[in-house]
Amino acid sequence: MSERDPKQAPDRARSSRPLPKLKPMKLDGFELDLDYYLKTHYASVYSANAELPSIIEWVNENLETAIYKKHMAKASLKQAEGMAFHDLRDPIKFEQFGFAGKLTEKAIDAAIPQLNYVVEANENYAKAAALVSRLVNTLISLQAKLDLVRTSEATRRAVVENDDARGEEQQ
């Protein structure tokens, strides 16, 4: 997979505080080990470039699907709320759903979120929205990891080139 240097000492900040284990992301029949990809010390930019861009694209593909599902869940929620509004306007159904009192717009508006099929639609929308948020944040984290590896590699090369240039000047 990637080049790890197990003999390399960890950063001081990491050695004093253990990091929490990240839960894997299970999507599209694949389980992505985020703990591995975000905590791996890549010894070279080549190993990071071999893994992270394809993982980033996989997350991006799943984000596309998740955004679509979120929009569909929102539409289902609005449909359920509309159906509930029409159901509750009927005084008999209003009472059958267990509501009492004067049938007003305010009473209907208060009752709509309590209907089981509206609650279920709302939960589905919340789950879809949470997945979109997690995928966006995962993309940001993976891209930051790749950027850090690239920056570290560029810095390492600059230091080596400067050391080589100083060595040539001294000769």
Image (cartoon, rainbow, N blue to C red):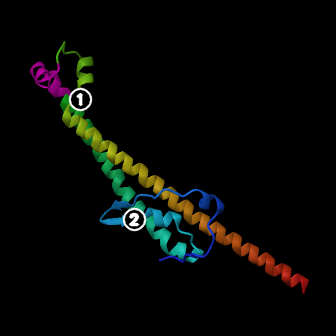
Span shown in magenta: 85-99
Residue type at mark 1?
Gln
Residue 52 or 15: which is nearer the viewer? 15
Residue type at mark 2?
Leu
* Magenta span main SS: helix
Whole-percent x, y for residue 18 in the image: 54, 58
Instruction: Using the image, determine if residue 133 lies above or below residue 59.
Output: above
Q: Specify the farthest residue to the right.
A: 170
Residue 59 left/right relative to 171? left
Whole-percent x, y for residue 170 in the image: 90, 83
Residue 114's disc number: 1
Q: Residues within 10 Å of mark 1 (few under 14, many from 20)?
A: few
Q: Specify the farthest residue to the front.
A: 16
Which residue is depicted at the point 42% across and 52% down?
134
Magenta run includes residue 97: yes
Instruction: Using the image, determine if residue 98 lies above or below residue 2.
Output: above
Residue 100 left/right relative to 168? left
Whole-percent x, y for residue 115 in the image: 20, 31
Real-space Cα distance between discs 1 and 2? 37 Å
Q: Are marks 1 and 2 in contact (CB under 8 Å)?
A: no
Magenta run includes residue 90: yes
Q: Secondary structure at mark 1?
A: helix
Where residue 16 sits, quadrant-wise, is: bottom right
Residue 118 left/right relative to 137? left
Which residue is depicted at the point 24% across and 27% down?
112
Q: Residues within 10 Å of mark 2 (few under 14, many from 20)?
A: some
Which residue is depicted at the point 76% across and 78% down?
161
Which residue is depicted at the point 34% across and 56% down?
65
Residue 53's disc number: none
Where residue 86 sits, quadrant-wise, is: top left
Residue 32's disc number: 2
